Image: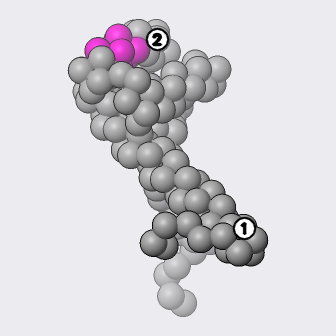
Amino acid sequence: MSGYSRADSQVDFLRSVQEVVRAADPVLALLNEVFAGTALYSEKLELWSIAKDIARSLAYGDITEVEARSMVEEVAAVTAARLQSEGKSVPPDVLAERLFEAIKEASVKSVAELRARMFERIVKSRMRARERGETLGIL
């Protein structure tokens, strides 16, 4: 016997799922970790939505990092208090820092996704122009 049980296999699978979520959405990964063991599902979803809005605004330059950090600190304070009421102790300053880092990571991904979509539209536009026999710039 190899000593590798079905339970080990399930744990490995769950870890791989967590890694995929962390890579795809760092904000959701953090919130899953922070809210684990609580029944605060609607609060977690609401916080995820708020954090995604902050990340999107940061990515598009609608708010500065200072403004984003201030918003995150306010959200983290309320969230930490709510978690405390459920018996889960999370220091607000630690939550704010981790959430801000996740939001910054998500905002970078938002910009990268926007860049990819715009590039795809430009390429398609140029292909249509070439099909019509037009020339567009150097490329």
Inter-mark Cα distance, 2 to 1: 54 Å
Question: Is 79 in front, or is 27?
Answer: 27
Q: Residue 37: x, y in percent?
A: 53, 31
Residue ID at (66%, 70%)? 134
**Magenta segment range?**
69-76
The residue type indicated by label 2 comes to: Arg
The mark lying in front, picked from 2 and 1, is 1
Residue at the right extreme, as displayed = 132
Earlier-in-chain disc, 2 versus 1 = 2
Question: Is 40 in front, or is 107?
Answer: 107
Residue 89 image-quadrant placement: top left
Residue ID at (44%, 27%)? 57
Residue 67 image-quadrant placement: top left
Residue ID at (38%, 46%)? 108
The residue type indicated by label 1 comes to: Arg
Q: Are marks 2 and 1 in contact (CB under 8 Å)?
A: no
Question: Is 76 in front, or is 6?
Answer: 76
Q: Per the image, is 75 magenta? A: yes
Instruction: Give the residue at mark 2.
Output: 82
In the image: residue 34, left or right of residue 124 = left
- The number of callouts visible is 2
Q: Per the image, is 101 magenta? A: no
Image quarter hosting the N terminus: bottom right
Is any atom of residue 30 visible in this view? Answer: no
Instruction: Give the residue at mark 1.
Output: 128
Residue 126 image-quadrant placement: bottom right
Q: Residue 63: x, y in percent?
A: 36, 22
Is any atom of residue 41 visible in this view? Answer: yes
